[in-house]
Image (cartoon, rainbow, N blue to C red):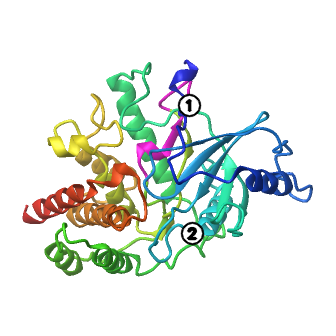
Amino acid sequence: MTKAVLDTAGKVRPGEELPIEPLKEWLQTNLNDTSNPDASKSDYSGDVKITQYSGGASNWTYCLEFAQQSLILRRPPAGTKAKGAHDMGREYRLQDSLKPVFDKVPQMLGYTDDDSIIGAEFYVMEKLNGIIPRKHFPKGLNISPQQAHKLCTVALDELCNLHNVDYKAAGLDHIGKGEGYTTRQITGWISRYTKAKTWNVPSAKKVMRWLEDNLPAKETICITHNDYRFDNLVLSASEPTEIIGVLDWELATLGDPLMDLGNSIAYWVQADDDFLAQNTRRQPTHLPGMMTRQEVINYYCEKQNIEAKDFDFYEVYGLFRLAAIVQQIYYRYHHKQTRNPAYKNLWVFVHYLLYRCKKIIKR
């Protein structure tokens, strides 16, 4: 496998640069702390190349390349943030606690809430060198239908592994409220969408009422990732059906596994979807051999010994939640809190996601 298929960052977006000297000083002091057994003991005083990942639409993620090693830095975006969102400290501590029981979490290296260093709180972690299957696999990597199907099963197996972690035994019962999660999610996402609404998107009241009226009578509580997609997985460069890391734990909590799966399904664009879905696709789930959404649901439910019937609520929830997330991002662009041109037409996608919700409700 050539180096060209490894995931790399690009140019830092204008206005999102990091102040280099204060950052290097913090890294040199804190990551070389002799009292910290996980300290990497590297020289961070020398030259550093800073690049930025463009795939995420939430927290800003950078790659810091020093002579001896590379690090990943995560910080919140600028502008107004939803309450409880972009909490770097929580994201850092959760991954640090989860690492011993779910080994696909990257190694955490350091965190600070001192915003005088780069203008915001941030944390750094190890850089996993591998393939990230974004909208397309990197040039030079062609996977067969058999490999595509295996990647689906491997990804779902890892999601099951996460859901099956004994969070109480792992001391992770503090990461979420647990019971009542389903109701809180519906209430919370309705509130977030309403607060972020701009003049050019629907009120979504019909979808909101349907979700409130169709809350499942039963919920199961486990660790949920809540953003589990192919473009948050790192694959082995030598074997692209092997997962070496799971990224982006910002939204992880104690929640319901079927709602977590519904979140994943919302991003799953299959080969026979319409042109708008294909144009907004951000993972290669359209390739020959990839599962359909229904096959994903069936596989997961069979493996977890859950009845797959009546998944409509979770599918509508996943799409509505995604519409609210997209609208929150668009709200920042609409009010000139970010200049990222990729957000300019997100309001169109909000219309489309709500259309998908209504289509499922009608059936």
Occupied quadrant, residue 42: top right
Residue 81, above or below 111: below
Cα–Cα span, label 1 and label 2: 29 Å
Q: Secondary structure at mark 2?
A: loop
Q: Residue at x 82, y 46 (%)?
A: 40
Disc on the earlier residue, 1 or 2? 2
Q: Is residue 193 left or right of residue 222?
A: left
Q: Position of residue 296 (x, y in %)?
A: 31, 46
Can residue 58 be seen?
yes
Q: Amino acid at mark 2?
A: Asp
**Quadrant in which the C terminus appears:** bottom left
> Magenta part of the protein: which range?
228-241
Cβ–Cβ below 8 Å for labels 1 and 2? no
Q: Position of residue 128 (x, y in %)?
A: 62, 39
Of the residues tagged 1 and 2, which is closer to the observer?
2
Label number found at residue 363:
none
What crowding class fits label 2: few (fewer than 14 Cα within 10 Å), some (14-19), or many (20 or more)? some
Q: Amino acid at mark 1?
A: Ser
For disc 2, the marked residue is 87
55, 319: nearer the viewer: 55
358, 298: nearer the viewer: 358
Can residue 301 be seen?
no
**Quadrant in which the N terminus appears:** top right
Residue 198, above or below 62: below
350, 148: nearer the viewer: 350
Q: Secondary structure at mark 1?
A: loop
Q: Position of residue 178 (x, y in %)?
A: 48, 77
Q: Position of residue 351 (x, y in %)?
A: 18, 60
Occupied quadrant, residue 344: bottom left
* Magenta span contains residue 88: no
For disc 1, the marked residue is 236
